[in-house]
Image (tube, rainbow, N blue to C red):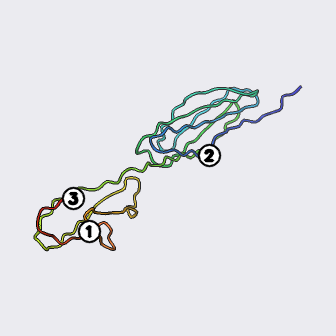
Amino acid sequence: WLIPHKPLQLVAQNTLTVKEGDKAVLWITAKDGYQKELSYSINTVNNAKFTQGDTYNTGIYDEKHIRFEWQTKIGDTGVYVIDASIGDISNTLDKKIIVKIQGRNSPSMIQPLQTINTLEGQQITVDINATDPDNDDNNHLTYEISNREFKQDSTEKNKFTWSAKPGNHTF
């Protein structure tokens, strides 16, 4: 009796998405109907730091499950290309896998304001400089000052003006 031919197969997801700081786990399954010794590897194109974890065999045919993992950290946000490869003595298969590390919603960073000295009745303009470490485009930030006497500029939302009154004021 004949065992049906099962061609070499590489099974893995096309895309893996995790948040920075989380562990990225990638499973690759290598199948070969001839029960030949299988080799496997992953190569990273842009510095993903996957390491090999558990490996186990299942099934009638030689089916090997290989776990790769990467404990991401803050700052790893980006898109990484992984080249997965499996082979036996006569064939090799490759597959590109996209790993997306999404940023966490980090707090905005506000530059400290300097002490402002002025005379009564003079107009003070406060220009708040803030950045969002998760986004290069800071146009989505909203600004406010707790003292309602400050008026927000209608076009430059990070600017506030106030006509000084006597006394020391902390905002």
Quick one: SS at disc 1?
A: strand
Q: Residue 160's mark?
A: 1
> Who comes first in sequence, dot 2 or dot 3?
2
Q: Counting residues from the N terminus, which is met first, the one under dot 2 or under dot 1?
A: 2
As helix, strand or loop, the secondary structure at mark 2 comes to loop
Comparing 123 with 21, the one in front is 123
- CA distance separating discs 2 and 3: 48 Å
Tell me the number on the disc at residue 118: none
Q: Residue at x 33, y 63 (%)?
A: 143
- Left or right: 36 as drawn, with respect to 85: right
Quarter assignment of residue 59: top right
Residue at image x 31%, y 58%?
Answer: 130
x%, y% of residue 163? 18, 72
Q: Is residue 77 left or right of residue 150?
A: right
Q: Residue at point 73% right, 26% down?
A: 35
- Tell me the CA gap for discs 1 and 3: 13 Å
The earlier-in-sequence mark between 1 and 3 is: 3
Distance from disc 2 to disc 1, alpha carbons, whole Å, reads 49 Å
* Residue 4 vs residue 93, the one in the foreground: 4
Determine the residue located farthest toward the right in the rendered image. 1
Q: Residue tagged by mark 2?
A: 14
Residue at (62% x, 36% y) in the render: 28
Residue that numbered label 3 is attached to = 113
